[in-house]
Image (cartoon, rainbow, N blue to C red):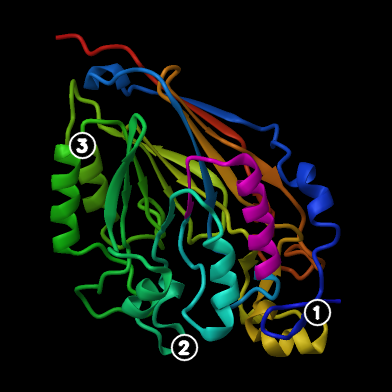
Amino acid sequence: MDVLPNGNKKEPIKNMMERRSFIRKSVKAGLILSLPFPISGYGLKMGGKLQIGIVADVHQDIIHDGYARLRFFMDDMKERNPNFIIQMGDFALPRKQNQPFLDIWNEFEGPSYHVLGNHDMRDLGFTREQTMDWWQMKKRYYSFDQGSFHFIVLDGNDQNPAPWSGYDRYIGTAQREWLTDDLRKANKPTIVFVHQSLEADSGVANKEEIRAILEGAGRKGGRSKVVACLSGHHHTDYVKEINGIPYIQINSMSYKWVGGKFETQRFAPHIETAYPSVRYTCPYRNPLYTVLSLDADEGKLHIEGATTQFIAPTPREIGVPDADGMHPTITERTLNFSTQMDKP
């Protein structure tokens, strides 16, 4: 048995490092989409490629082996040295026992960025500000440029304006105004990151309003500056194009949530005691993450594929009704966007 930094024993992820090639193996069912986005229409100097390491929904406070999963990701990122890394929310609460987990993330010597998730606040009584301070996150929504691209990080956790049950999932007035202004000023093709999706029913509550900003702001020749929007939160794997913008779901690094009706004890009692919510999940055997590659010259966005299995019993074996739609996978995808100049 391995031992966690907090002193608890854990079951190891079997031969994790030796199976790196298996985890990074591309899923053959790739998807190619042609998007009418004219990179050269913004007067950019063509050239340069970007690679971005992305992880979503690690849930260190739920999964029993979050340290090992993040360590696997970080060792790979150190070897591959992408332009930056980003975590898509539901990462870890600012608890003392989680400091070694955050220390792993902070080992990356290049730029690293955070997206706030709903489970990064309120759980166990922590506030958004406490989490931001612990992560050393200066702003809850922000933007930055890297190479030939502009990146926007949104916070989908504003307070809902009407009475609401469950977690807040809203983007408020001040943030909407900032987003509109930021897109107006941007002179590069743009990638948006947000924890809760902008297209699913259980995503951002005012998603139509935010999509309208993405679609309308900074249009040229009827085309948006936004190349793609990536989100986590839903622990699933798909892409949905709406009005020329692909909304890409990045699967959880760790598990699919199935809830109390399908509670299952898979691990030793000391693990279940230390991580009591793990019994409400169907954990992935190995960590899922991806590398996003952007190529301004060829007008391509590529998501690296990865696949693993569920730790038994699987969702189907425990009778989850929609089990056939649950896959421990990140599908390889290549999205094309046009580099032709707009016609006057």
Residue density around tag 1, few if under 14, some if 14–19, many if 20 or more, within 10 Å: some
Q: Amino acid at mark 3?
A: Ala
Mark linked to residue 124: 2
For label 1, the SS is loop
Which range of residues does the magenta coloring cover?
A: 67-86
Disc 3 or disc 2, which is closer to the eye? Answer: 3
Q: Is residue 340 above or below residue 141?
A: above
Q: Is residue 300 above or below residue 309?
A: above
Q: Which one is nearer the viewer's eye here, 185 or 265?
A: 185
Q: Which one is nearer the viewer's eye here, 208 or 70?
A: 70
Instruction: Give how far across and how far down residue 253 sits, in percent.
Output: 62, 59
Res. 129 image quadrant: bottom left
For label 3, the SS is loop
Residue 75 colored magenta?
yes
Residue 52 colored magenta?
no
- Residue 226 visible in the picture: yes
Res. 149 image quadrant: top left
Mark linked to residue 186: 3
Q: Determine the residue positioned at 56% across, 33% down.
A: 333
CA gap between label 3 and label 1 equals: 49 Å
Q: Amino acid at mark 1?
A: Phe
Instruction: Give how far across and how far down residue 216 sits, in percent.
Output: 18, 37
Mark linked to residue 9: none
* Mark sitting earlier along the chain (3/1): 3
Q: Determine the residue positioned at 17% across, 33% down.
A: 218
Res. 285 image quadrant: bottom right
